[in-house]
Image: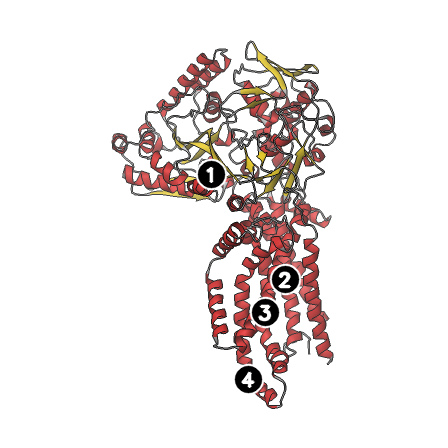
Amino acid sequence: MEMKGKRRAVVALVAGLGLAAVTACSSGTVKSEEAKSAVFSIADGLPDHLTPGRGYSYNQYNALFAPLMRLSADGTLTMVQAESMESSDNRHWVIKIKSGWTFHNGEPVTAQSYVDAWNATAYGPNAWANSGSFANVKGYADLNPAEGKPKTKTMSGVKAADDHTIEVDLVTPDSQFPLAVATGPAFMPLPKVAFDDFDAYDKAPVGNGPFKVTGTPNLTVSMEVKRYDGYKGPQPGSDGIVFRFYSDLHTAYTDARGNGVDIFRVPVDKWPHVKQDFGDRFSAFKAPALQFLGIPLTDKRFRDPRVRKAISLAIDREAVNKSIFGGLNDPATSITSPAHKGSPANLCDYCSFDPARAKQLLAEAGGWSGGPMQIWLPGGLGYEPLFTAIANQLRQNLGIQDVQIKTLPGFTPFFEALSKKKVDGPYRGMWGSFYPSMAELLTALFTADGGGQFSTGYVNERMAKLVEQGNASGDAAEQTAKYVEAEKLVLNEAPVVPLFYDSYVYAWSENVTDVEIDLTPINITKVKVKR
Amino acid sequence: MRRYITMRLIALVLTFLGVTLLIYVLVYALPGDPIRGMAGDRPLPEGVIAELRARYHLDEPFPVQYWYYVQGVLRGDLGTDFNGRPVAELMADRWPVTLTLALTAWVLELVAGLALGVLSALRRNRVLDRVVMILTIVAISVPIFVIAYTAQLVLGVHMRWLPISGIAEGWPRSYLLPAVVLATFGIASVSRLVRTSLIENLDADYIRTARGKGLPSRKVVTRHALRNSLIPAVTYLGADLGFLLGGTLIVEGVFNLPGIGQLLFASIQQQQGPVVVGVATLLVLTFLVANLVVDLLYGVLDPRISHVRR
């Protein structure tokens, strides 16, 4: 009897613990209020930093902050917080901002709000991710000395002439600077409260944009922003946005089919199905972005440009685009894409599919005798099918017996292998331009400190000179001519194999209309919610 | 008994130390710079990388890094991730989700598994038994991904009965679908275990004796046969609680539940040492505690299994 009582007690205790745990855990649930007001949701990854200078959470920055200018999908600039941005020599820039605009806490947005924010972003010891946006501004070097602490906290090249005038001095003239200002989160302003405590501000930022945070967002499940009534810019078509965090966008895909989430980026392996599943409710924005095969130029097997051209000529980009991307990307016909302002594309004479010429070039270069050819890529990110297809094409069309893909577990070890020069074959390369300028892409890929980890390992000083001349020119036609000349110089030596011009593919639920995808990438003020 | 529990608790502490060191070594041994990896396709100035490496002690040799970590733990500080968010906070946000999911699934295994097992044992070789056994084979052999996606498409997209993902609607609605998916394997296993062992016991001599003494059939089954048939199921359920906690990874991913599994997966990918160590250690500890509880339960179910030193 005693034993039995004990047994019952234990069973009751276990059951009770289980129930208590279950109910206790469920108390902290989030109630959704989306049905009541015109609020829509965006599927998003977990934001890293909510301060625009500090991270890569573009959707949040676009909601909470207004840019000086906006770059539309067709490449035109329209003023938002700025009234004008002008320069007579592409070196000294004067930006006038509109008066009467306020931050969400009522503080007026002034030229000083910009100057302070830009200095904080550029200040080396802060270690903010977007500090490189100011690399060409006078005084940036003083805030980022090679050794030791900087002696000053402000860039000499950025000044508030009065409450509504910002003056910027660049190190080298740059006609493309307005494009950078329009698209870079680093160029957003910060209110005074941000400077009391950057980390506290980062948790609940006060911006100058169409939406504001309510309370302190808990960055676990979702983050809500509400319409800011004092916003002076183009009025948003909705009352608020919920950013719903997904660890895997495939779930968002299924969720959006059931109208459970409204706007999301379509994972690449779903591109061939998106038309069937979402009909007209998707958009593939032609981005100024290039997917390419990098080549280990120090490896002697790849030193002959004919080998690199042969690799390029052996790839049937049309077929791969159809089977892997559902035809939503475009085969590259050049390094810069038609989305880069002024780019004529079609500059590459080794980017078509021509297996006969490929074999001939390879034979002229002495054939392939380096054992297996490995194509290196970061794994687990969905790139495997693309590079498997490319490996198959190289095997068939070049007659190289053994072409394999070499998958490393994620970006981190992939960069490590690249930087340690362990990569002994073509490798996955990608550059998405921050603004649609040929100069941006060429500088990022083919100058010594253009893109850091993504350097192609190829630097061309003559090309850099030509780009600089284009940047300094005040005439759009002359700029383009210089950039084209620069690009031709690079293509002559075939240091990379251009593959595709990348698209941003987004789809949306039946709850929303007026979804426009551009470089930002979602034009969130335009989105309307169906009642 | 007390001595037994004390020994087990000491083992727990030693395991904790060993596990943290081991996991720290493993994370540290991964190649590459996590700060660089976090930027992905985007550029990060070299100065920023150097500054962040110094801030999170990534530029120090391994023993120094581990010493910083242990020092922190002794002060009750589990460290931060590389965006400066405290690990304790990250885990506090996510443990409840995983616990709720795992316990809901566990209760489902317990209730549904027992019920199905007992029913099929009592209706041995009849239609119900056959149907249940076929269903358990299906549940055990179909991969969890397939079950999860099918459940999402049928119950979420087409019927619109339950939310497909997230925890916006709270418990139970948001947790039902993932918990059922997570529990399918367990329900099938438990019901098979209970069925087999109950059938065995029902044929045993002592049951025949009990029936012969005229005890009512309900009492024979519940008091005598079932109690003795529970040991395999309890062993399974005990081990499974730990497994469910650690194994929520796939289900959390497919149903987008912000639990500990998701956090662990992302942190390993990003080589967030302090987060990985914190999460993994807690998982190991939970598993050990669950095992301890099961071992103690044995003694209650079957007095022949005893932890008391005679």
Subunit under mark 2: B
Q: Position of residue A373 (x, y in %)?
A: 35, 40
Q: Is B148 on the left or on the right of A311, as rendered? A: right
Verify CB contact (< 8 Å) between mark 2 and mark 4: no
- Mark 2 or mark 4, earlier in chain: 4
Instruction: For the C terminus of chain B, give its image quadrant.
Output: bottom right
Q: CA distance from mark 1 to mark 2?
A: 39 Å
Q: Residue at x 66, y 18 (%)?
A: A98
Residue under label 1: A417
Subunit under mark 3: B
- Vertical placement of residue A484 versus B135, above or below: above
**Do the dots labelled 2 and 4 sit on one chain?**
yes
The three-letter amino acid code for the residue at tag 3 is: Thr
Q: Mark number for residue B235?
A: 3
Mark nearest the camera among 2 and 3 is 3
**Do the dots labelled 4 and 3 sit on one chain?**
yes
- Mark 4 or mark 3, earlier in chain: 4
Verify CB contact (< 8 Å) between mark 4 and mark 1: no
Residue under label 2: B288
**Do the dots labelled 2 and 3 sit on one chain?**
yes
Q: CA distance from mark 4 to mark 1?
A: 65 Å
Q: Between A61 and B282, which is closer to the camera in this rendering? A: A61
Query: Tag 1: Cα neighbours inside 10 Å, few (<14), some, or many (≥20)?
Result: some
Q: CA distance from mark 4 to mark 3?
A: 22 Å
Q: Between A364 and A378, which is closer to the camera in this rendering? A: A378
Residue under label 4: B204
